[in-house]
Amino acid sequence: MNDRAGWLPRIVGHRGAAGLAPENTLEGLAAAARLGARAVEFDAKLSADGVCVLIHDDMLDRTTDGRGPVAAAPWRAIRKLDAGGWFGPDWRASRVPTLAQALDLARAHDLQCDIEIKPSAGREVETALAVVAEVTRCWPARRRKPLMTSFSRLALAAARGAAPRLPRGLNVWEHPDDWAAAARDLDCGWVICADRFMTRAWAGAIRKAGFALGVFTVNDPRRAATLWRWGVGAVVTDRPDLLSTGR
Ligand code: G3P
Ligand code: MG
């Protein structure tokens, strides 16, 4: 895979290692590295005051002891929340990290990053610009560039405009009719698809169109082996430990 298309290994830890440690935390990213993953996917969103933080949902409720929209909470409040207690009592010290902290940890563990730009509604462009600004500020130029991914085409377009040399991937859920045109227009090297809708034929079509193919979320090693046979380049998994043989 050339630099423009970006690089991901065969196994990518989903939200860190979401089956084994609280998602989108530094502990989760470190767990993925410990389990042998060479790359992690995580979700980046903006706090009320524009700080890029790692969290999947629009609301704080599921993965922290906070309440309400992430977009309405300032960083000084988010930073105090418990982001691990929901996962298990041993994880209560886990916090919502900033993107800068996550990039520092990834660098220290030599992890490649699939940064999913996960904007709150209406903040697509602002979030993408903040993410690429943090990557440009924090990520050493000599290292392989992180992959910018998103379901939001607005976010990918903004990322492309601000930092065209950062590689991009289009996340898709079902089979959007215009997936190929969209990925091409956004100059994406990767198309990253939901396993639930992945078939051999669709994998073949994506590969034939010249895109690298990722699939999420795959926790069964037999399914991962099938996908790799179909030409899938990166399998995003909550359980890098289960998939790591033969990577
Ligand atoms: O790798 C893509 C995957 O993370 C997209 O789904 O909902 O887990 O962010 P989600
Ligand atoms: Mg994600």
Image (tube, helix red, strand yellow):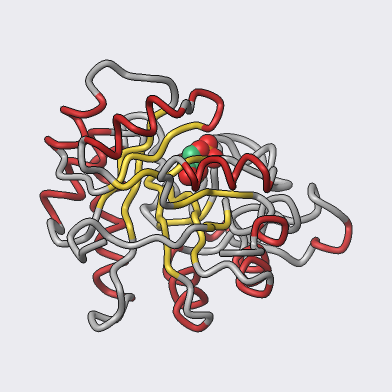
Image position of 115 (left or right of 167): right
Residue 11 horizontal/vertical position (percent) = 53, 58
Q: How many marks?
A: 0
Between 81 and 162, the residue placed more toward the observer is: 162
Q: Residue furthest top?
A: 177
For the C terminus, the quadrant is bottom right
Residue 190 x, y percent position in the rendering? 30, 46
In front of the other: 42 or 13: 13
> Residue 16 falls in which quadrant of the image?
bottom right
Residue 202 position (above or below residue 155):
above
- Provide residue 39's location: percent of width, then percent of height: 49, 65
Residue 51 pos. (x, y %): 40, 57
- Position of 53 with respect to 129 (left or right) is right
Relative to residue 83, is residue 224 depicted above or below?
A: above
Q: Is residue 72 visible?
A: no
Q: What residue is rendered at 49% in x and 47% in y?
A: 228
Q: Residue at x 64, y 63 (%)?
A: 244
Within the image, what quadrant is residue 218 found in?
Answer: top right
Residue at 58% from the left image edge and 67% from the top image edge? 37
**Image quadrant containing the N terminus:** bottom left
Residue plotted at (51% across, 61% down): 40
User: Quadrant location of residue 156?
Assistant: top left
Residue 19 visible in this rendered orientation of the protein: yes
